Image: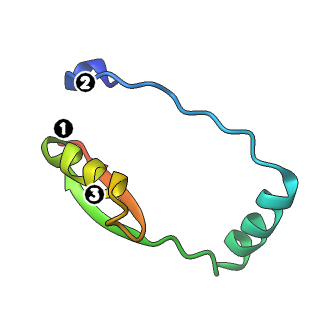
Amino acid sequence: MLSAAGVTGTPVMSRPTRDVLAPLAEQAAAGTLKVVVSDVLPLDRAAEGLGRLARGGASGKLVVTLDN
């Protein structure tokens, strides 16, 4: 899918513990989990968003959109 869009990627894996996941799962099930989205940017502006994250200038998640 990435190659079809002309981009490459590397998976990032983590191994969260039950102590971390259990409260998140409870919040998700209850509908109370809130995710702060700092910005939604098109792919051609992703580097800008990543720079902002690296500088600590974002207060939430960065969402990058791909046009089909």
Q: Earlier in the sequence, mark 3 or mark 1?
A: 3
SS state under label 2: loop
Circle 3 packing at 10 Å, graded few (<14), some (14-19), many (20+), is: some
Gap between marks 3 and 1, in whole Å?
26 Å
Q: Position of residue 14 (x, y in %)?
A: 67, 38
Q: Which mark identifies residue 7?
A: 2
Q: Nearer the viewer, mark 3 or mark 1?
A: 3
Circle 1 packing at 10 Å, graded few (<14), some (14-19), many (20+), is: few
User: Please, is residue 14 above or below residue 1 in the view?
Assistant: below
User: Which is nearer the eye, 64 or 46?
Assistant: 46
User: Which is nearer the eye, 29 or 37?
Assistant: 37
Left or right: 35, with 61 as reference point: right
The three-letter amino acid code for the residue at tag 3 is Arg
Which residue is denoted by mark 3 in the rendering? 52
Q: Earlier in the sequence, mark 2 or mark 3?
A: 2
Which residue is denoted by mark 1 in the rendering? 68
Quarter of the picture holding the C terminus: top left
Q: Position of residue 22 (x, y in %)?
A: 83, 63
How many discs mark residues in the rendered view?
3
Q: Position of residue 26 (x, y in %)?
A: 78, 71
Tell me the residue at 13%/42% (across/down).
Answer: 44
The three-letter amino acid code for the residue at tag 2 is Val
